[in-house]
């Protein structure tokens, strides 16, 4: 995970790990095991016909792999929200889904302009969505809270004028 | 829980996704909202979604959330691309002339006779 820390920026960090899973998450990140499957997809800026494809592809793959439907729903919602955020709020980026036999580790990396205050962005109802984004029905300021609610671990790294990294871990079994 | 088909009859709804049958589809309630993230955060699987939004993203939202059918208020009808995507994902699209308030009210009455 530290690989993504762009040292030249003064990046702010946000972590949320479901209680009781701290050790499991730390252990996973420390081990740096090769994923079984990697899906990578580009997310262009403000194209809401394309945004969502990565999540949809991932959902279909995990369904084929037999992931439990409640867990699948949590993964689908979290990944869709994060994918839409890249399209809605950044100049574009990519989604990388690392599939393991017991968990999914998703990374959303965009090309800026970054988040000036991550704690504020996490507040339900906080949104800087522009008119176009709102026309599409986004901009309630509930995407990041939804991601937090559905993830076992959420890590955000960003700063104004920098790329944003959003990382999500969801275990397939409790 | 009621049959989707009974609700569609009550609201004089038109099935825009005629390739998908209403037969056997049961619904537990509705979520009424036009903000997609609010739907993803609060709608429950098995509820229909009553809205006026009709662009492509609603299909993804319904599919991610486990919503079996979207009910369009005030005679809104989605375009062909949206209908095709809905059929692919198995999401039933219903259009009704009634406004949102009446669509929700009629369903509430059916569920709580
Ligand atoms: N990838 C990103 N790059 C830059 N800013 C972001 C990014 N993701 C989120 N933000 C900022 O955080 C705010 C809150 O995000 P959140 O997803 O909670 O709400 P929203 O996207 O505005 O609306 P909603 O998700 O309800 O449609 C955004 O309005 C934006 O200011
Ligand atoms: Mg959002």
Image (cartoon, rainbow, N blue to C red):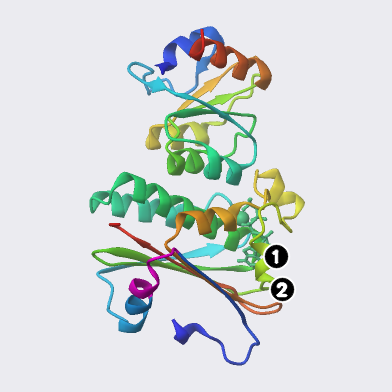
Q: Nearer the viewer, residue A168 or B87?
A: A168
Residue highlighted by disc 1 = A120
Answer with the quarter of the image where residue A123 lies.
bottom right
Q: x, y percentage for residue B104?
A: 60, 19
User: Image quadrant of ligand 1?
Assistant: bottom right
Q: Residue furthest front?
A: A20
**Depicted A24 relative to depicted B37: above or below:** below
Quick check: A15 left or right of A133?
left
In the image, the residue with mark 2 has its CB under 8 Å from the nearest atom of ligand 1: no
**Labels in figure, total:** 2
Image quadrant containing the C terminus of chain A? bottom left
Say few, some or many: other residues with alpha carbon within 10 Å of mark 1 (under 14 / 14 to 19 / 20 or more): few
Question: Marks 1/2: CA distance?
Answer: 9 Å
Examine the rendering and report whether any part of residue B53 can be seen: yes
Which label was assigned to residue A142? Answer: none
User: Does residue A22 show up magenta in the picture?
Assistant: yes
User: Are the residues flagged by discs 1 and 2 in contact, CB closer than 8 Å?
Assistant: yes
At 54% across and 40% down in the image, what residue appears?
B42
Q: Is residue B61 above or below residue A102?
A: above
Instruction: Assess disc 2: are there few (<14), some (14-19) or many (≥20) residues with their C-alpha within 10 Å of its C-alpha.
Output: some
Give residue B24's quadrant in the image. Answer: top left
**Is the residue indicated by label 1 positioned so its CB lies within 8 Å of ligand 1?**
yes
Could you tell me which quadrant the N terminus of chain A lies in? bottom left
Q: Which residue is mark 2?
A: A116
Q: Position of residue A88 (x, y in %)?
A: 64, 58
- Residue A51 in view of the camera: no
Relative to A100, residue B43 above or below: above
- Left or right placement of residue B94 versus residue A131 in this view: left
């Amino acid at each position: 995970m530290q690989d993504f820390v762009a040292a030249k920026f003064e990046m702010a960090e946000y972590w949320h790990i479901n209680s009781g899973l701290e050790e499991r998450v730390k252990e996973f990140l420390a081990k740096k095991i090769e994923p079984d499957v990697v899906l990578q997809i580009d997310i262009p800026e403000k194209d809401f016909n394309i945004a969502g494809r990565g999540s949809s592809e991932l959902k279909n793959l995990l369904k084929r792999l037999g992931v439990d439907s409640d867990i699948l729903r949590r993964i689908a919602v979290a990944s869709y929200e994060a994918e839409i955020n890249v399209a809605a709020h950044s100049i574009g980026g990519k989604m990388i889904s690392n599939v393991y036999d017991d968990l999914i580790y998703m990374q959303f990396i965009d090309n800026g302009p970054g988040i000036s205050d991550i704690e504020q962005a996490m507040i339900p109802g906080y949104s800087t969505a522009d008119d176009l984004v709102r026309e599409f029905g986004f901009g309630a300021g509930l995407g990041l809270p939804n991601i937090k609610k559905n993830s076992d671990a959420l890590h955000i790294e960003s700063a104004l004028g920098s790329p944003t990294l959003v990382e999500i871990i969801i275990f397939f079994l409790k | 829980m009621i049959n989707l088909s009974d609700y569609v009859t009550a609201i004089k709804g038109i099935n825009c996704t005629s390739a998908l049958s209403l037969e056997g589809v049961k619904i537990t309630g509705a979520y009424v909202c036009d903000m997609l993230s609010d739907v993803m955060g609060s709608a429950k699987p098995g509820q229909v979604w009553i809205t006026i939004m009709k662009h492509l993203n609603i299909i993804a939202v319904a599919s991610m959330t486990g919503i079996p059918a979207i009910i369009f208020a005030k005679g809104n009808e989605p375009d062909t691309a949206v209908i095709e995507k809905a059929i692919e994902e198995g999401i039933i699209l219903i259009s009704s002339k009634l406004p949102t308030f009446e669509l929700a009210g009629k369903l509430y009455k059916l569920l709580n006779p």
